[in-house]
Image (tube, rainbow, N blue to C red):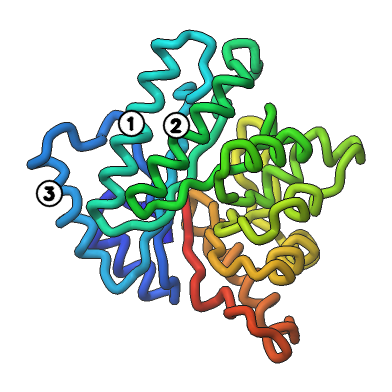
Amino acid sequence: MCNLFLDVKRLREFALDYGFSGIDWSFEPSTLPQTPAEESMWVKYLSSLKPLELRYHCPFHRIDLGHVDPWEATAAEEIFRSIIRLVARAKGEFLTIHIGLGRNSTEPLSWDRTSKNLSRVVQFGASHGVRVCLENLAWGWTSRPHLFEKLIRKGGASVTFDIGHAHACEAVNTQEFQIEDFLTPHADRVLNAHIYHTELPDRGHIPPERLEDIKDRLEMLQRIGCNWWVLEVWDEKGLLQTKKVVEEYLTQAPYWANSDHQDPSANMASHG
């Protein structure tokens, strides 16, 4: 599950008690280790979460690789490079990043600089054994499937597909695009999924009330073989409600019996 709790002992116990097998760890820019000694302490700190599998997430507001200000863009790139080095030191293999998170306009962003710097960060990650994944958001360039596809293709990134953002975005709600349009151009690159129903202004991520809320989207993930499902709900009650719905789906889905894909229940993480 995610770092829903600050205390890793409580986090580990909660995850194992409720049958999760992984944690999607979200970094906070203000608490990143600053020295080699602090990095060593952080790696040791996270090692206490074994046997849970860890993947990593950078939900950083207004830290953008493609900022129109070259200094801002360079500073953002250095932050992501330092995190890639940190993830590699912890023997991590997957890191999710965003473009335009926390903004309500793309005016401060440069498309060309975003594409080029994303490619540089992806290559830097590959050189350290870390797959850099770009997440679709509910707003901005990554909320539009055709632009998301261009960024993935030109930047060489893998994909973290957020089913709640896809449900909430204007491109889908106006029926200009379908949710599957986020997946079909690069189905083989979708390595992670964030699972909840939808995102609402001022309320955040809303858990599903019933299986029908998310069943079609879970089927899409199942068809393409994405088997790392992060239950991205911040409160315990909503998280466990989401888990209940996902488990209901997994017990009903006949797909695994006739598929070479791995059952995602073996890799279900809760995430904040």
Q: Is residue 78 visible?
A: yes
Residue found at x 69% / y 71%: 222
| Badge number at residue 60 | 2
Q: Nearer the viewer, residue 186 or 7?
A: 186
Q: Is 61 placed left or right of 153 in the picture?
A: left
Nearer to me, 209 or 26: 26
Depth check: give the residue in front, 250 or 36: 36
Residue at 53% across, 21% down: 66
Percent coordinates x, y for residue 261 in the rendering: 63, 79
Question: Nearer the N terminus, badge 3 or badge 1?
Answer: 1
Q: Could you tell me how far apart the alpha carbons at marks 3 and 1 are, in whole angstroms?
A: 17 Å
Q: Determine contact: label 2, label 1, CB under 8 Å.
A: yes
Which residue is disc 3 drawn over? 41
Q: Would residue 4 be seen by someone viewing this image from the given angle?
A: no
Quick check: 139 above or below 188? above
Q: CA distance from mark 2 to mark 1?
A: 7 Å
- The amino acid beneath tag 1 is Pro
Q: Residues within 10 Å of mark 2 (few under 14, many from 20)?
A: some
Relative image position of residue 86 (x, y in whole percent): 26, 45
Q: Residue at 65% across / 61% down in the picture?
A: 188
Q: Are marks 3 and 1 in contact (CB under 8 Å)?
A: no
Tell me, yes or no, whether the two marked residues, 2 and 3, touch with CB atoms within 8 Å: no
Residue 148 lies, with reference to residue 2, above or below; the image says above
> Where is residue 221 drawn, in percent x and y?
69, 64
Amino acid found under the numbered disc labelled 2: Phe
Residue type highlighted by circle 3: Met
Residue neighbourhood size for the residue with mark 3, other residues' Cα within 10 Å, grouped as few (<14), some (14–19), many (≥20) = few
Identify the secondary structure beneath mark 1.
helix
**For the residue labelled by badge 3, is the local secondary structure a helix, a strand or a loop?**
helix
Of the residues under marks 2 and 1, which one precedes in the sequence? 1
Judging by the rendered image, the residue that carries numbered circle 1 is 29
